[in-house]
Image (tube, helix red, strand yellow):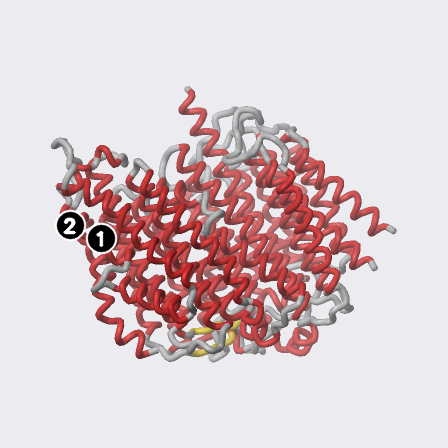
């Protein structure tokens, strides 16, 4: 019953999100949609994915969208390239309907198929260095997937740095002693949560992604409250931030090369050392993910000036 | 049973995303539509994982990877739109 | 040793690409350029290895990620190395190129090498996304709203294509429970979910390869990009997506790739050949002409794929040299198109104009680039004594054996169209050169790089014996 209601709500929100012509509304609905989707994923026994979707797919994506919206022209001013002004013609509706039916029947046909890699994962879990299967897949069995996905994040950031236009608007900074005190109190807590999530990832849902998302919000809070910290242009800090951006990919790939040296194969670890290497990689990855995501949100702020990063 | 419901939900998101992509007027709407679609694709992978207990860890790991890829692409798309807005504002000045 | 080399093929460009973010701006060109040359060396070296399959981290498939170095992967890595190396030299000579180019380009190169090696459908998706992000960013290196809009459109098409591909991957996993291409190929049964996955993944990759009618993003993106970037995108990046199509049609979905399915490909390909050729004949701008020619040439590649699929489906035809022919055509197009774009960019720079009506004199004063363009055109059109001739000969004889008269005719007409729009440029340089005008100074070394690529595309024909007999 709950599942049916949730499904209907998700579909209704999604429909509204793509139908509405008010961009602000569309974004707010999109964030709500992300939260409900995350809820649905916990029902599908996927707590890792649900956590990541809530934090990244809804939270940070929402921040990015809202910050960018303020720098964009109104709906009427830009016409999306190649966009149609009227609704869909009957031909496209027909195609759309046919595809939908084809997909439903295709998925229905494999609804009860029992194929899975889980037995394989479980059989090799003891050699993976961690006890949580999802982490074992991400950091060990399919490590190059994760390394290249960190590369996607880094290259997307490289592109955004290059596309950067200095903000033109003045946004009044959030001020007040209460805020600063609150952030100062919250910050250690958030770092603690991030470290806990990272550590927990080896045996239970959690890990570099979720931890990175928490770090990103911590850094953003620091910046929004205008506290001296990572966001200032100080020689040492600047170097630290740059190292943080690159850290995830470089540490991962270098450890991967070390695997060749140790005879464990490219992107492999000797089983007795796997746990330690994975922890090292995850720490670098969490820091990278946090810094990169926060940097992406920061440069999208309407009042962001070059040189702060 | 709940598996089937969520499969339908996933496909619904994919189809709504495709529809939104076709009728979008603004670049932001196009990006949102693609993200609705990707949420659907990820959910489909998760329903595949949840067909028989214990839940299959491989598709769950793929979804985590996919989420990070999706936000990277979204951030890049938004940066392009911001740049475009600035360039167009400049040419109108 | 081998494993080191293969690992470095991916790790080296990615690490250096990442490091360019912290290298001081003045040294980026040196660091990036040297890193690119080493990558090219690694790629050429990979061609000399014996074919092998290895699973990363010493796991075994289906749990681990498989890397497969077979003839097809080796050839593509080698083509990317040669063309990428020479384009890097050109980029080094181009002082107007922003330093961020090097990080993006090395990232794209690492992504392509990983893409050619991987035997895993999901990993293929990840490499494709890395490649797209880097490519879109490279298009956006050009200042101005036009290029940004083209880059955004490219991103949208690319993302939609990736999502369709991933939807297919989800269906495949749901049906077979594995992601490894060789294992999927071994289990493939022509049932409904598999057919659906086949269709979705094909459409996704057709969009990324810019096959008609999903080509709309290409002329803008490739024509607006900076010269070195245009060459990389047209010669290499779309080949990566086409490589995916080859893997799907010839390997993963083997039993589903029937003669009737190949007709769909053939029809799309024919439309692409005619439409791309027509637009190239009509356009008033130089780089647009070269970009439309890519649309037509991609059609030629897809037509060849359709013929190979037919040949594989009809067992009575001797199935020799099937993928070899496709790879040969890819190499022909990569060399010729890179040469053509680089030469066109040099001329455009000299004339300070992209309009055909205004470049006549610059063409006349760039004889080396004109020779490069002419050689590129005759190789693309498949005239004798070129690499393209061997490719065209292979294509025509395959069509002959299959008695596919329609495709035979289309491929001949395609060659005629290529010569027709190629002649437009030569005509400008030889006959209607226009009035003398002041030209911008551009290093003649850049003309020579284009000529090197074009000459390789011609002389490769003499290496044909070794390639066709050797593999």
Mark 2 Cα-neighbour bin, 10 Å: few <14, some 14–19, many ≥20: many
Whether labels 2 and 1 share one chain: yes
What is the x, y in percent for residue C297?
36, 54
Which numbered marker is on residue C22? Answer: none
- Which quadrant is the C terminus of chain C positioned in? bottom left
Q: Quadrant of residue A222?
A: top right
The secondary structure type at the circle numbered 1 is: helix
Q: Quadrant of residue C143?
A: top left
- Which quadrant is the N terminus of chain C positioned in? bottom left
**Residue B68 vs residue C265: left or right?**
right
**Residue B42 vs residue C345: left or right?**
right
Q: Residue at x 40, y 37 (%)?
A: C147
Q: Identify whether A293 is placed above or below A73.
A: below
What is the x, y in percent for residue B50?
75, 63
What is the x, y in percent for residue C381?
28, 56
**Is the residue under label 1 in contact with that under label 2 (CB below 8 Å)?**
yes
What is the x, y in percent for residue C245?
48, 62
On the question of residue C300 being in view, the answer is: yes
Q: Residue at x 47, y 80 (%)?
A: A263
On the question of residue C39 being in view, the answer is: no
Q: Residue at x 63, y 37 (%)?
A: A88
The secondary structure type at the circle numbered 2 is: helix
Which chain hosts label 2? C
Residue for badge 2:
C368
Mark 1 Cα-neighbour bin, 10 Å: few <14, some 14–19, many ≥20: many
Q: Identify whether A171 is placed above or below A121.
A: above
In this rendered view, identify the residue nearer to me: C429 or B84.
Answer: C429
Q: Quadrant of residue C308?
A: bottom left
Residue for badge 1:
C450
Q: Name the outermost residue toward the top.
A: B93
Q: Name the outermost residue toward the right.
A: A1
């Amino acid at each position: 019953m709950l599942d049916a209601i949730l499904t209907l709500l998700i579909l209704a929100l999604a429909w509204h999100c793509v139908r509405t012509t008010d961009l602000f509304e569309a974004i707010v609905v999109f964030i709500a949609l992300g939260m409900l989707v995350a809820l649905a994923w916990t029902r599908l026994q996927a707590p890792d994915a649900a956590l990541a979707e809530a934090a990244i797919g809804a939270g940070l994506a929402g921040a990015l969208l809202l910050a960018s919206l303020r720098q964009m022209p109104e709906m009427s001013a830009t016409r999306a390239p190649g966009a149609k002004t009227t609704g869909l013609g009957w031909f496209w509706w027909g195609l759309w309907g046919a595809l939908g039916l084809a997909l439903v029947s295709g998925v229905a046909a494999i609804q009860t198929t029992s194929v899975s890699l889980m037995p394989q994962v479980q059989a090799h879990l003891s050699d993976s260095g961690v006890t949580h299967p999802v982490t074992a897949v991400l950091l060990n069995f399919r490590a190059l997937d994760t390394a290249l996905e960190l590369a996607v994040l880094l290259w997307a950031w490289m592109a955004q740095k290059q596309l950067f236009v200095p903000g033109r608007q003045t946004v009044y900074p959030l001020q007040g002693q209460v805020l600063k005190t609150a952030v100062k109190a919250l910050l250690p807590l958030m770092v603690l949560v991030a470290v806990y999530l990272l550590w927990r990832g080896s045996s239970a849902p959690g890990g570099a992604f979720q931890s990175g998302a928490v770090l990103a919000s911590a850094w953003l809070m620091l910046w929004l409250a205008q506290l001296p910290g990572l966001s200032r242009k100080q020689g040492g800090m600047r170097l630290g931030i740059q190292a943080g951006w690159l850290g995830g990919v470089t540490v991962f790939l270098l450890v991967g090369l070390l695997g060749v040296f140790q005879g464990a194969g490219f992107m492999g670890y000797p089983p007795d050392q796997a746990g330690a290497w994975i922890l090292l990689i995850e720490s670098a990855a969490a820091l990278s993910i946090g810094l990169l995501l926060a940097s992406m949100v920061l440069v999208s702020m309407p009042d962001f000036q070059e040189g702060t990063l | 049973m709940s598996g089937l419901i969520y499969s339908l939900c996933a496909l619904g998101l994919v189809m709504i995303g495709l529809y939104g992509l076709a009728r979008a007027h603004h670049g932001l709407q196009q990006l949102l539509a693609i993200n609705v679609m990707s949420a659907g694709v990820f959910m489909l992978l998760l329903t595949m994982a949840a067909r028989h207990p214990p839940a299959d860890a491989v598709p769950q790991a793929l979804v985590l990877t996919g989420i990070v890829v999706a936000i990277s692409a979204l951030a890049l798309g938004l940066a392009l739109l911001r740049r475009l807005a600035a360039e167009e504002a400049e040419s109108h000045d | 040793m081998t494993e080191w080399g293969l690992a470095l093929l991916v790790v080296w460009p990615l690490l250096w690409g990442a490091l360019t973010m912290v290298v001081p701006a003045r040294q980026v060109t040196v660091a990036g350029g040297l890193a690119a040359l080493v990558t090219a060396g690694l790629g050429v070296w990979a061609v000399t290895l014996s074919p092998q399959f290895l699973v990363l981290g010493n796991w075994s498939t289906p749990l681990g990620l498989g890397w497969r170095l077979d003839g097809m992967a080796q050839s593509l890595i080698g083509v990317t190395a040669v063309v990428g190396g020479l384009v890097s030299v050109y980029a080094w000579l181009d002082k107007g190129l922003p330093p961020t180019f090097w990080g993006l380009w090395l990232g794209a190169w690492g992504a392509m090498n990983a893409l050619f090696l991987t035997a895993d459908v999901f990993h293929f998706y990840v490499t494709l996304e890395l490649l797209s992000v880097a490519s879109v960013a490279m298009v956006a290196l050009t200042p101005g709203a036009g290029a940004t809009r083209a880059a955004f459109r490219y991103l949208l098409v690319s993302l939609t294509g990736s999502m369709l591909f991933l939807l297919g991957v989800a269906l495949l996993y749901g049906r077979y429970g594995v992601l490894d291409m060789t294992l999927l190929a071994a289990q493939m049964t022509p049932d409904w979910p598999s057919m659906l996955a086949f269709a979705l993944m094909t459409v996704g990759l057709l969009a990324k390869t810019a096959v008609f009618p999903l080509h709309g993003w290409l002329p803008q993106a490739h024509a607006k990009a900076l010269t070195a970037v245009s060459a990389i995108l047209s010669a290499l990046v779309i080949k990566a997506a086409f490589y995916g199509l080859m893997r799907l049609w010839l390997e993963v979905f083997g039993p589903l790739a029937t003669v009737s399915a190949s007709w769909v490909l053939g029809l799309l390909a024919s439309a692409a050949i005619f439409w791309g050729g027509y637009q190239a004949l009509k356009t008033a701008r130089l780089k647009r002409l070269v970009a439309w020619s890519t649309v037509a040439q991609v059609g030629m590649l897809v037509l060849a794929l359709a013929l190979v699929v037919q040949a594989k489906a009809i067992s009575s035809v001797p199935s020799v040299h099937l993928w070899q022919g496709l790879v040969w055509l890819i190499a022909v197009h990569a060399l010729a198109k890179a040469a053509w774009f680089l030469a066109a960019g040099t001329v455009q720079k000299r004339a300070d104009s992209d309009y055909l009506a205004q470049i006549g004199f610059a063409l006349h004063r760039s004889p080396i680039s004109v020779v490069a363009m002419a050689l590129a055109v005759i190789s693309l059109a498949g005239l004798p004594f070129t690499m393209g001739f061997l490719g065209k000969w292979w294509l025509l004889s395959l069509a002959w054996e299959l008695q596919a008269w329609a495709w035979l005719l289309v491929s001949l007409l395609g060659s005629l169209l290529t010569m027709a729009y190629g002649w437009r440029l030569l005509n400008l340089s030889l006959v209607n050169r226009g009035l003398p005008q002041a030209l911008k100074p551009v290093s003649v070394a850049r003309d020579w790089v284009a000529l090197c690529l074009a000459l390789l595309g011609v002389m490769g024909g003499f290496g044909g014996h070794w390639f066709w007999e050797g593999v």
